[in-house]
Amino acid sequence: MKQTIYLGTLLMALAVASEPIAVTVNYSNQAAIPNRILRAALKEAEFLFSKADVEINWVDCTRFEGALEIPRHCQHADPTRFRVTFKADSDMRAVTMGFAYPTIGSGNRAAVIYSRVTAYASKHSDMSDVEFILGVAIAHELGHLFFRTTEHGDGIMMPQWDRVQARKIGQRGLRFSASQAETMRTALAAR
Ligand SMILES: [Zn+2]
């Protein structure tokens, strides 16, 4: 009897985990990141979220930046979509690779500063390729939006990365924890 209950719980857990939450993310490459690197980085971020059962659908809105006519699906104000802007540089003094606004407006805007990513990547070039680092930076900033908080935590959500993290990123070992995945999915489902 005890075994049956255990199996039932296990099956329920598997059923929950196998149903990913789909999320649409608009991005705008304002940093002229080479296509090859950006594509690989988006794929890496997508992989990291897939491990947390969150499915990312990317929409390239780069060419509409500053345009007079912006299609509805690329408009900033659309609250059903998340938005990541890749910036070449920033005058923000904090040593950060990006920022996110999880509590401002629709809580759907984030940015990644490419020069900070490449600076970290060249410092630890023996540990990881830049596309993996960019991928984790994207996952981190989107993580803030999905969690709806600027707070930090373990793994991908660590506030600062040093050499240890660079090695983990290179080995594709920096992930969202199981409990982070659950929190994220609950927060996304509640939006
Ligand atoms: Zn952060």
Image (cartoon, grey):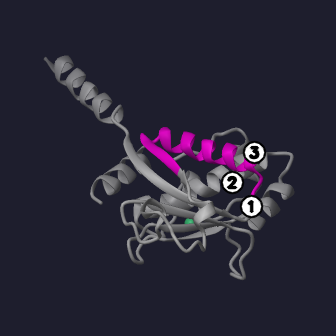
Percent coordinates x, y for residue 178 in the rendering: 43, 43
Q: Residue flagged by tag 3: what amino acid is it?
A: Arg
Residues under numbered marks 3 and 1 in contact, where contact means CB atoms less than 8 Å apart: no
Give the residue pinned by disc 3: 36
Quarter of the image where the N terminus is located: top left
User: For the residue carrying disc 2, how many other residues have a C-alpha within 10 Å: few (<14), some (14-19), or many (20+)?
Assistant: many
Left or right of 25 in this view: 127: right
Percent coordinates x, y for residue 101 in the rendering: 48, 73
Percent coordinates x, y for residue 155 in the rendering: 57, 51
Query: Which residue is found at the position 68% from the left and 81% from the top?
Result: 92
Q: Which mark is residue 134?
A: 2
Q: Secondary structure at mark 2?
A: helix
Residue farthest along the front direction in this orientation: 69
Q: Residue flagged by tag 2: what amino acid is it?
A: Leu
Q: Nearer the viewer, residue 72 or 32?
A: 72
Q: Secondary structure at mark 1?
A: helix
> Which quadrant would residue 77 be assigned to in this image?
bottom left
Looking at the rendering, the quadrant in which ligand 1 lies is: bottom right
Q: Which mark is residue 117?
A: 1
Q: Residue flagged by tag 1: what amino acid is it?
A: Val
In the rendered view, would you say 69 is above or below 118?
A: below
> Which quadrant would residue 102 be assigned to in this image?
bottom left
> Which quadrant would residue 89 be assigned to in this image?
bottom right
Q: Earlier in the sequence, mark 3 or mark 1?
A: 3
Percent coordinates x, y for residue 129 in the rendering: 79, 45
Q: Earlier in the sequence, mark 2 or mark 3?
A: 3
Give the residues in magenta: 32-58
Residues under numbered marks 2 and 1 in contact, where contact means CB atoms less than 8 Å apart: yes
Label 2, label 3: how far apart the Cα atoms are: 12 Å
Left or right of 52 in this view: 174: right
Mark 3 residue's CB less than 8 Å from ligand 1: no
Q: Nearer the viewer, residue 93 or 3?
A: 93
